[in-house]
């Protein structure tokens, strides 16, 4: 750090030079991100609440009330009227909280000292972080195609099984596990069930309202104990904005630690200092869009998803699986997938690849226009024609 202060102009000039190296969602060239440009009202409200700290809610009771309202509103999307939970930094923190709650509950009430989580191979990497942090063993259930094999899942259960994880909108393919069958197994064995709907939570409910035939995946199944849903993905809130919902307050209680010097004497979240701005921005964007706005968004991205899927097939690419949500994974039988990703990057596209199976992965978010899709297809056709 220099001893002499810099002027505002100097600071902005320096920072803008760094920012020029960043990609922008608005360019429509970011194809592999589950995040997107936040709605204008979310950004405006975020700045307004920038100094609020929900880690000390007694100082910010108004902002705490905003968080509570946002939690209740998100809960209404997934069949629970009175959820408990918090707005957090994202899906990783939400999944960490769920795993910690399950572990602590099993330790206190079931005397499980060597806790295990059963997850599908498609599970997000955050569960491996949780296992490392909380001393849990990860047990991977086999896959039936690209979804968890429920028979394999049940066969993996033993006396140390603490939690089962189901996915509603897998990170790589956007598929939805058979949560209804998984819930029956969890209930039969009295095991905590967590649903990771970080991506699907702001898509599935609105597509169902428009007639899409999705099975139950949420708190309408009484075995579901917690859910992860990310407002900063298809919720169009600011980064960072995640959400963890619990069916019962007892799951927060088993995580509570004493915080004697704060205005609230106990704390259940993983982080201490928590931005209230994310809660305010999330509530603002939900109230601004309403169910109608989210339904229109969901239909629009699904229409673009099918446009991409059909366009890929027309030019000789193989689509891994029929999209359930707005994610398309594809490959070309004559082109190495990593090489194809490199060729696309050379043409200004930023894609990601899936690992199971190996494929190019495109998340069709709001910032990707139909013109962007047409341009991508032109480039993909040119690439395959030159092989």
Image (cartoon, rainbow, N blue to C red):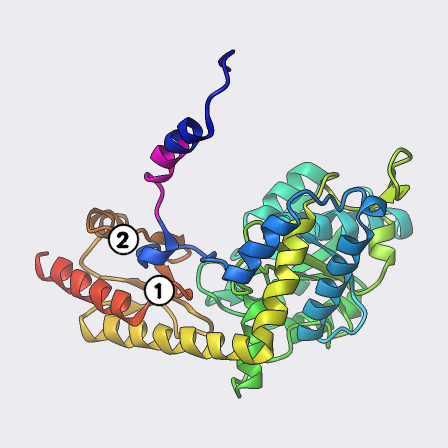
- 315 or 365, which is in the foreground? 365
Q: In which quarter of the view is residue 184 placed? A: bottom right
- Percent across and percent down for residue 332 are 23, 61
- Percent across and percent down for residue 93 are 65, 47
Circles 1 and 2, Cβ within 8 Å, touching? The answer is no
Does dot 2 land on a helix, a strand or a loop? loop
Residue depicted at 91% across the width and 35% down the height:
260
Q: In which quarter of the view is residue 82 placed? A: bottom right
Residue extending farthest to the top is 3
Residue 219 higher or lower than 20, as above or below: below
Which residues are the magenta region?
A: 15-23
> Would residue 187 be seen by someone viewing this image from the given angle?
yes
Residue 222 higher or lower than 114, as above or below: below
> Is 21 part of what is drawn in magenta?
yes
Residue under circle 2?
A: 349
112 on left or right of 215? right
Residue under circle 1?
A: 368
- Percent across and percent down for residue 109 are 90, 52
| First along the sequence among labels 1 and 2 | 2
Q: Residues within 10 Å of mark 2 (few under 14, many from 20)?
A: some
- 93 or 73, which is in the foreground? 73
In this rendering, the count of numbered labels is 2
């Amino acid at each position: 750090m220099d001893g002499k202060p810099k002027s505002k102009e100097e600071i902005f000039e320096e920072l803008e030079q760094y920012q020029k190296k960043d990609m922008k969602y608005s360019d429509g060239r970011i194809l592999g991100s589950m995040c997107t440009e936040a709605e204008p009202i979310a950004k405006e409200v975020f700045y307004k609440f920038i100094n609020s700290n929900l880690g000390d809610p007694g100082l910010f009771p108004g902002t705490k009330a905003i968080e509570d309202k946002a939690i209740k509103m998100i809960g209404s999307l997934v069949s629970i009227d009175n959820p408990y939970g918090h707005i957090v930094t994202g899906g990783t923190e939400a999944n960490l909280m769920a795993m910690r709650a399950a572990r602590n509950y099993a330790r206190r009430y079931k005397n499980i000292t060597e806790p295990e989580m059963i997850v599908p191979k498609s599970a997000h990497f955050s569960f491996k972080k949780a296992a490392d942090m909380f001393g849990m063993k990860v047990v991977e259930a086999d896959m039936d195609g690209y979804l968890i094999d429920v028979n394999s899942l049940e066969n993996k259960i033993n006396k140390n099984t603490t939690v089962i994880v189901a996915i509603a909108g897998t990170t790589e393919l956007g598929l939805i596990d058979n949560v209804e069958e998984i819930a029956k197994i969890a209930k039969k064995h009295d095991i905590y069930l967590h649903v990771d709907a970080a991506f699907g939570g702001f898509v599935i409910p609105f597509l169902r309202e428009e007639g899409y035939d999705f099975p139950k995946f949420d708190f309408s199944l009484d075995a579901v104990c917690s859910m992860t849903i990310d407002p900063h993905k298809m919720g169009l809130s600011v980064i960072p904005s995640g959400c963890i919902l619990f069916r019962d307050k007892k799951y927060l209680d088993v995580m509570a630690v004493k915080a004697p010097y704060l205005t609230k004497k106990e704390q259940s979240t993983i982080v201490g200092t928590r931005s209230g701005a994310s809660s305010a921005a999330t509530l603002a964007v939900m109230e601004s869009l309403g169910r109608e706005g989210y339904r229109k968004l969901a239909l629009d991205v699904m229409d673009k998803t099918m446009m991409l899927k059909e366009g890929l097939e027309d030019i000789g690419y193989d689509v891994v699986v029929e999209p359930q949500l707005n994610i398309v994974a594809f490959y070309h039988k004559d082109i190495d997938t990593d090489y194809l990703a490199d060729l696309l990057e050379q043409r200004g596209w930023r894609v990601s690849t899936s690992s199971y199976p190996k494929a190019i992965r495109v998340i069709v978010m709001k910032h990707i226009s139909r013109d962007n899709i047409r341009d991508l297809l032109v480039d993909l056709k040119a690439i395959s024609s030159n092989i």
